[in-house]
Each structure stands twice: as C-alpha cells, then as structure tokens.
Amino acid sequence: MTSLATSVERSETLRTDVAANPGRYRVLTGERPTGPLHLGHYFGTVAERVRLHDSGVDTFVVLADYQVVTDRDAIGRVRDNVYSAVLDYLAAGIDPDRATIFTHSAVPALNQLMLPFLSLVTEAELHRNPTVKAEHAASGRALSGLLLTYPVHQAADILFCKGNLVPVGKDNLPHVELTRVIARRFNDRYGAVFPEPQALLTSSPEVPGLDGRKMSKSYGNAITLSMTADETAAVIRKAPTDSDRRITFDPVARPGVSALLTTTALCTGSDEHEIADTIGDAGAGALKKIATEAVNDFLAAHRRRRDDLAGNPDHVHAVLREGNRRACEIAEQTLAEVRTAMGTMY
Ligand code: TRP
C-alpha cells in the first residue's frame, strides 16, 4: 500500500498539473448524506471542490444515499439531508450548469457496475481494507455485505463517469487505491475501458468539533452550515471549556478552548496563538463571543444564498433531477462499453 507521505507528495505534483491543465481532469467526489453539512465539511471538502470547479475541472458530486446504510440500519432523514447538501453546494458556488450533482440510488447503470467489479477483487482484499475495518469496529455491529463491499461501490461511483481525479481525506485513500486496482484488472482482462484515477489528498486541516474531537454530527459537536446566527451562538455558548481565565492554545490539555480558537482562526484566516494573546485573561466567555462572531461573519454570505435558494425548492429539485439525468446517460454509456468489452451485448 502507498504510504501517506508518498500520497501527500503525489498530490502536490498533481495539484500543479490540475491548475495548468484543468481540461484533462474529471473530478468525482461526494459524501454519504447522513446529516447536514457542517464547518468540518466546508473546510475539509466543499471549499476544495469549489476551487477545482472554479479552475475549470469537470466536476461530479455524488450524494451516496445507498451508502448511508453501510454502518447503520436506519436510513434516517436521507431525503432532507440530500436536499440540504444540494443547497450547500449551490450556495458555496457549485454551478449546476457546469457540474453534475446526483444521488446514487437514481443511477441504476452505475450500480450494475458492482457485479463485474466484485469479480475482480478477493474476499481477503476486502477484509484487509483499513477503513472498512475501522468503520466496522466503530459501528459495533456485525459486518454487513454492503460495508464489506463498500470500496467496490465507491469504485463504481468513480469509474462510471471515468473520473480520474478524486479529492479525498486520508480515510478514503484505500478506496481510491482499490479503485485503481479494479480499473487495472478490468482493463487487463477485457480491454482498456477505464482510467486509473488519482487521489488528490485534501490539504485543509481537520476541523475540531466544539468538544475538541473531530467535528461530526454523531458526536453532537458540530456547527452546521444551515444553522441561523442565533443557533450558532447557542451551540457555542454550550460548548465545554474550563475555568482558567487565561486563554491559551493547548489542544491536549484544553480541547474545548483550543477548538474554539481553531474555529476562529479558520474563519478569520488568522493564528490560534495570536487570537489567544488578544483575549488574554478575559476568559471563556470572551472567547465564545469572538468565536461566535467569527463563525457568523464567515458564514453570513453562504447562509444568505442558502436561504434564497431554499425559497425556491423547485429549482433545487430541478438541479438534482438534471444531475441524475446526466449521470444516468453517462452510466448507461459506460455500462454499454463494459458489456461490449465483456461480450454481453445482445
Ligand atoms: N465514502 C465517502 C465518504 O463517506 C463518500 C463517497 C461515496 C465518495 N462515493 C465516493 C468519495 C466516491 C469519493 C469518491 O466520505
């Protein structure tokens, strides 16, 4: 398996080439619609997607609704989560005329790629995938067939549109690696159909949640993009801090205080230590006031655009329908190529 250092280095070279030759790349990326998007998504993935899209790279975003049930039984408010994510993408600057936003379950031909792809990997390879192992352990449940084959599903997401650039966090690197293996084996066995996609490691920092752990809806420590300014103030007010009035940046000893400093730093483009020095010994109340203002100022324009879009649900539905139509057209084309290569066109 490729080391993280090699992947980081490769991503730097790749970034330069993408900037110089955006027309050579098709980005496929996405997420599981398990909850509303939050600041962690914004800094971690959404901002990078918008940057790539703005630089002229053809962009596909999958809302992987089938994958919601990889590590849980409850599908949850998947429909609301999908619409909410579309609102956030549009508000963040993804132009639906130049990008394709689609849902997994609406593209049957994409899902059909699973069958030939599954024949190209062994059970041992699937069991070795570190991300699947970690997610299985965290789920506290029996390993489902869907979770075990999750990386193959992700390969189908990427390869159906011949995506060759996949911006991911390091958790998803093993999936991209397996996607390359699947593409290579398919091409070797049946003839050249697929590109071998490259992972573009997201360079942005991990955003801490309000308790200092990774920001995640399931930890209840997230500031979502869709919150109002007042709701944001309320969750920050409730964030755990400590009674030391002197504000210092120390993520290990003071996770809550430090998380608020990092959040403020990200939203204002400044440095945690400088913010801490400015607050001095004014205490956690002053820090919370500054953090609230920083987040609300940073998200104000996004939230305004989001509210405007939410006032026109027909438009949002139309964006998703058009994305699904486009994705279906491409998936059918690719499936026809696959079946031709395999000799199963009748
Ligand atoms: N597995 C990804 C996640 O949960 C989401 C995802 C689904 C994805 N299909 C993808 C990411 C294809 C990149 C490419 O984070």
Image (spheres, rainbow, N blue to C red):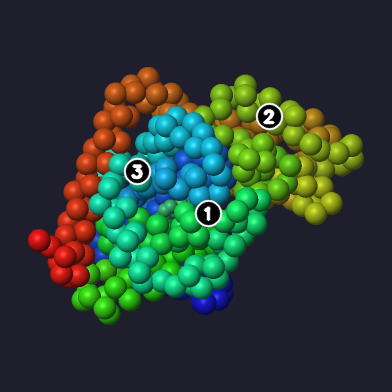
| Number of residues whose C-alpha sits closer than 10 Å to that of mark 1, classed few (under 14), some (14–19) or many (20 or more) | some
The quarter of the picture where residue 311 lies is top left
Is residue 23 shown above or below 189? above
Q: Secondary structure at mark 3?
A: helix
Is 60 or 152 nearer to us in this picture?
A: 152
Asked if marks 2 and 3 touch (Cβ < 8 Å), the reply is no
Please tell me which residue is depicted at 30% across the width and 29% down the height of the picture. Answer: 317
Residue holding disc 2? 235
Residue located farthest toward the top when viewing the structure as drawn: 311
Residue located farthest toward the left when viewing the structure as drawn: 346
Is residue 11 shown above or below 239? below
Frontmost of labels 3 and 1 is 1
Q: Is mark 2 within 8 Å of ligand 1?
A: no
Reading the chain from its start, which is encountered first: label 3 or label 1?
3
Reading the chain from its start, which is encountered first: label 1 or label 2?
1
Left or right relative to 157: residue 301 = right
Q: Give the Cα separation between the discs numbered 2 and 3.
A: 34 Å
